[in-house]
Amino acid sequence: MAQQVASAKRQQDLQIQYSNYKETLQAIAQKIGDVEQEAEEHKLVLDTLTPLPGGRKCFRMINGVLTERTVQDVLPALQTNADGLKKVLDELLKQYRTKQDEMEKWKKKHNVQVVQQ
């Protein structure tokens, strides 16, 4: 009887740990999706503004306020932001792979097999 309780407790602990891994991976994947979307938006704007003359008027949203600028003022800041997003995306992908590898090692160590229903 005590052995059954211990086995059930162990199984419950493994299930909780597996759920935690899945939730963490899902959260990282969501962040990756958000950053990818933002990076794509930056790319579109950069592609649109790059061929335009530097003195041309354009508008930029800063903290919810639409401000008037010129293309030559906006392009460097936009490029810096796009580069920063790429770095964040690379870091998130690295975190995802690391967490996925950690989960696979954990599954092998505890002989966990996922049953899909």
Image (cartoon, rainbow, N blue to C red):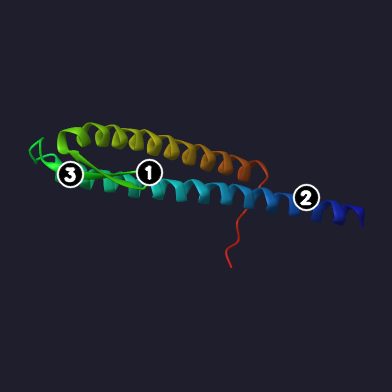
Which mark is on residue 63? 1
Please identify, in this view, whether the residue under mark 2 or under mark 1 is nearer the observer. Answer: 1
Q: Earlier in the sequence, mark 2 or mark 3?
A: 2
Q: Dot 2 corresponds to which residue?
A: 10
Q: Residues within 10 Å of mark 2 (few under 14, many from 20)?
A: few
Q: Quadrant of residue 103?
A: top right
Indicate the secondary structure of the residue bearing disc 3.
strand
Write down the residue under mark 3. Answer: 58
Q: Residue at x 13, y 39 (%)?
A: 50
Give x and y (percent) for residue 37.
34, 50
What amino acid is found at the position of numbered circle 1 in the picture? Answer: Asn
Q: Residue at x 35, y 46 (%)?
A: 36
Q: Residue 5, located in which quarter of the rendered image?
A: bottom right
Categorize mark 3 by other alpha carbons within 10 Å: few (<14), some (14-19), many (20+).
some
Q: Secondary structure at mark 1?
A: loop
Badge 1, how many Cα within 10 Å: few under 14, some, many 20+?
A: few
- Report whether 3 appears left or right of 54: right
| Mark 1 or mark 3, earlier in chain | 3
**Does the image show residue 18?**
yes
Q: Which is more toward the observer, 64 or 87?
A: 64
